[in-house]
């Protein structure tokens, strides 16, 4: 099993005011089309040219990223660092897309670049990325199209300047529909039943079975993981077995 975004990730250890009925994830900006004169953009992004695409190093992609920010007139990339990149045929049509993860101290995004034609691109940013984009794409149902697995957060409405609310995360599935990724977690019950919930059970058990001296320091982690599990199981955010009954 891939180590993706299955385990609940603790972004803050404060416990004030957590709720389990809000979320923050997914599409974080409108798709932007632009013309690029960068050498990467002018290559043909198709299966016949995949070796040339994969031979591009991090410096070439970083230069492409910098050029794209200037060419589309967006401040989206300002102050961000590149976490990783990969080429993938997301739609299973022989055309390849470039996926780049971007992050700051406050957030992370996956940016997908679609090539309409050499030199003509569309970018779409999605919130909730891991540093390695390869960990976020997988064909979960065998239809030849890649699903996105993005991190979605528990409620952060109780955040204050001095007492930030804890942020625990769970994986949310997006699928291609009419050329755009949309949230579709309910369409993939097997993913949650066989990968997500069993992993959470192990994590919860590991914390519960620690020594009393260690348990206090790990109690916040346990609470957040249980909140994640309850979100999946009882609130209908994911289509696991308990939710379907």
Image: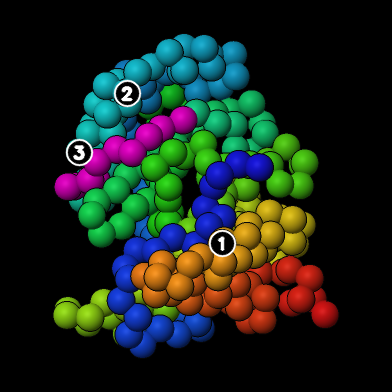
Q: In this rendering, which labeled residue sits more in front, label 1 or label 2?
A: 1
- 18 to the left or right of 21: left
Q: Closer to us: mark 2 or mark 3?
A: 2
Residue found at x 56% / y 62%: 206
Q: Residue 84: x and y, percent? A: 37, 34
- Looking at the picture, tell me which residue is in the foreground, 10 or 29: 10
* Residue 76 visible from this viewpoint: yes
Disc 1 secondary structure class: helix
**Residue closest to the eye, 227 or 245:** 227
Mark 3 secondary-structure assignment: helix
Q: Specify whether 240 is left or right of 220.
A: right
Circle number at residue 58: 2
Q: What residue is pinned by disc 3?
A: 70
Dot 2 crowding, Cα within 10 Å, few <14, some 14–19, many 20+: few
* Residue pointed to by mark 1: 206
Residue sitting at x 50%, y 82% = 20
Sooner in the amino-acid sequence: mark 1 or mark 2: 2
């Amino acid at each position: 099993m891939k180590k993706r975004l299955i385990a609940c990730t603790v972004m803050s250890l404060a416990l004030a005011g957590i709720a389990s009925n809000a979320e923050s994830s997914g599409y974080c900006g409108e798709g932007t089309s632009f013309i690029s004169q960068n050498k990467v953009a002018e290559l043909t992004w198709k299966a016949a040219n995949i070796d040339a695409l994969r031979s591009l190093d991090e410096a070439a992609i970083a230069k492409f990223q910098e050029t794209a920010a200037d060419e589309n007139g967006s401040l989206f990339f300002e102050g961000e660092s590149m976490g990783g990149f990969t080429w993938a045929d997301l739609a299973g049509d022989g055309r390849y897309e470039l996926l780049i993860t971007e992050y700051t101290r406050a957030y992370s995004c996956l940016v997908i670049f679609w090539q309409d034609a050499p030199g003509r691109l569309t970018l779409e940013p999605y919130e909730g990325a891991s540093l390695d984009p390869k960990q976020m794409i997988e064909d979960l149902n065998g239809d030849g199209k890649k699903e996105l697995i993005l991190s979605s957060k528990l409620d952060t409405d109780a955040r204050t300047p001095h007492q930030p609310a804890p942020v625990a995360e769970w994986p949310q599935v997006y699928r291609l529909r009419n050329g755009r990724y949309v949230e579709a977690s309910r369409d993939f019950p097997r993913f949650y039943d066989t990968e997500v919930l069993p992993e959470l059970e192990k994590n919860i058990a590991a914390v519960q079975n620690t020594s009393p001296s260690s348990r206090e320091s790990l109690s916040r982690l346990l609470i957040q993981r249980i909140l994640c599990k309850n979100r999946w199981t009882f609130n209908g955010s994911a289509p696991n077995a308990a939710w379907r009954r």
